[in-house]
Amino acid sequence: MKVLVINCGSSSLKFQLIDSDSEQVLAKGLCERIGIDGSQIVYTPAGGDKITTVSPMEDHTVAIKMVIDALTDQEHGVIKDLKEIDAVGHRVVHGGEKFSGSVVIDSDVKDAIKDCSDLAPLHNPANLIGIDACEKLMPGVPQVAVFDTAFHQTMPEKAYLYGLPYEYYEKYKVRRYGFHGTSHSFVSARTAEILGRDKKDLKIIVAHLGNGASLSAVKNGECVDTSMGLTPLEGVIMGTRSGDLDPAIVQFIAARENLSIDGVLDVLNKKSGVFGLSGGFSSDFRDLEAGIAKGDAACIRAVETYCLRVAKYIGAYAAAMNGVDAIAFTAGVGENGPMVRGKVCEYLGYIGVSIDDAANQVRGDEKIISTADSAVKVLVVPTNEELAICRETVALV
Ligand code: ADP
């Protein structure tokens, strides 16, 4: 089967066309600045060069039309006809409590995604627009929604409730949902495969450290805790997001900086994290690593604070699961950051983690980076959310 995987943002759209039999990516790309001046599509067929086409895209329907045109282009296309696309898999950010797995999209599902928009006001409406656009351009082709939150729906009540008046949960569904679920699911399952073990017998901690970052505790194949909450702002320190903090800071900063609550939240989302800690130097760990190599104190401060927070979450999840068999690092920083992995694992000797420094130099490849006698296996496992979405889509159609 050929599956088009779509990840629709408010002004961008990432796509991959995947052959589900070989699991090869036939083509991939990105539409940027949809609805804004200067929109463009960057398209890369497998084995070919990037092709950038600047063209107005007034909305997502136009963007998807351009994706289809690129895929079927006589010169650079990878399919002859739109009819070769057997199914579409959509990444949908928030499924609330309604979805604990992927679903074939129908009008009820679309209504339910709309109902969850309150919880993800930037993402769910954009995801719906992508779904509508595909329905319009590819009538009759089955479409599947794969939710970022679904994998975490197995969390027990004691892990997903906040210490708030219970009525807020009852009235507004204020609770921990978690995000990056497709990645946590894919990476935990792959970790078990690499170790040659059944995931049902393992306690795994997944550290998804990208621009956004979250950790999850996966026991016997099911998520029992995760670090992101009602929104993707909670948890570890991220590229530009603060992660956990004393909620009273919101009022404290608002009063002193003359900001509204929205204004403070904007700072917490966009100007905090390692970016904020480094005094606005960078949110990118490549820059921070370069700064540290030169002895830059701001970069050292940012990375040290980041690594301690990640290590503390791993300790917390080892406690939540009463042990841990494996820790898997994934996403941009987790896959490419020997320094971060090394610093995090330095805190974990007490649970029996021992890192092989030579193995830990790996960037971007699957590898066991713990020593042979390490009580806890530590691995680098590249995530592949698109492939996971493709597999879920095929399973349902
Ligand atoms: P997201 O999907 O959340 O946008 P990614 O998982 O792609 O993020 O991670 C992006 C981050 O990964 C970059 O901001 C950077 O900090 C980090 N990163 C990417 N490549 C490298 C590298 N070679 N070395 C260190 N860090 C890297």
Image: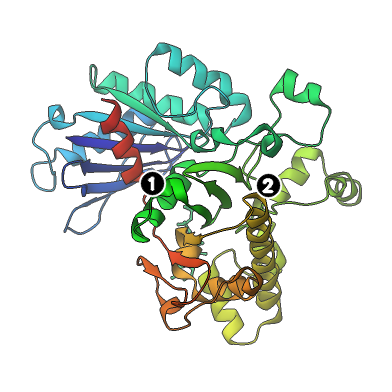
How many numbered tags mark residues here? 2
Q: Residue drawn 18% across and 40% down?
A: 71
**44 horizontally vs 251: left or right:** left
Q: Position of residue 245 (x, y in %)?
A: 78, 52
Question: As rendered, which of 228 and 28 lies closer to the eye?
Answer: 228
The answer to whether residue 139 is visible is: yes
Residue 163, compared with residue 138, is above or below; it is below
Q: Position of residue 141 (x, y in %)?
A: 23, 22
**376 horizontally vs 37: left or right:** right
Question: As rendered, which of 355 and 23 lies closer to the eye?
Answer: 355
**How is the protein colored in the picture?**
rainbow
How many angstroms separate mark 2 from mark 1 (CA)? 21 Å
Residue type at numbered disc 1? Glu
Quarter of the image holding residue 21? Answer: top left
Question: As rendered, which of 232 and 196 lies closer to the eye?
Answer: 196
Q: Residue drawn 70% across and 45% down?
A: 266
Residue type at numbered disc 2? Glu
- Within 10 Å of disc 1 (Cα), the crowding (few <14, some 14-19, many 20+) is many
Quarter of the image holding residue 83? Answer: top left
For the N terminus, which image quadrant? top left
Q: Residue drawn 65% across and 65% down?
A: 311
Q: Mark 1 CB in 8 Å range of ligand 1?
A: no
Find numbered disc 2 in the image and state the secondary structure of the residue it sits on: loop
Q: Position of residue 205 (x, y in %)?
A: 54, 55
Residue 216, compared with residue 96, is above or below; it is below
Residue placed under numbered mark 1 in the picture? 385
Sequence-first disc among 2 and 1: 2
Residue sitting farthest toward the top: 108
Residue placed under numbered mark 2 in the picture? 234
Find numbered disc 1 in the image and state the secondary structure of the residue it sits on: helix
Residue sitting farthest toward the bottom: 294
For the C terminus, which image quadrant? top left
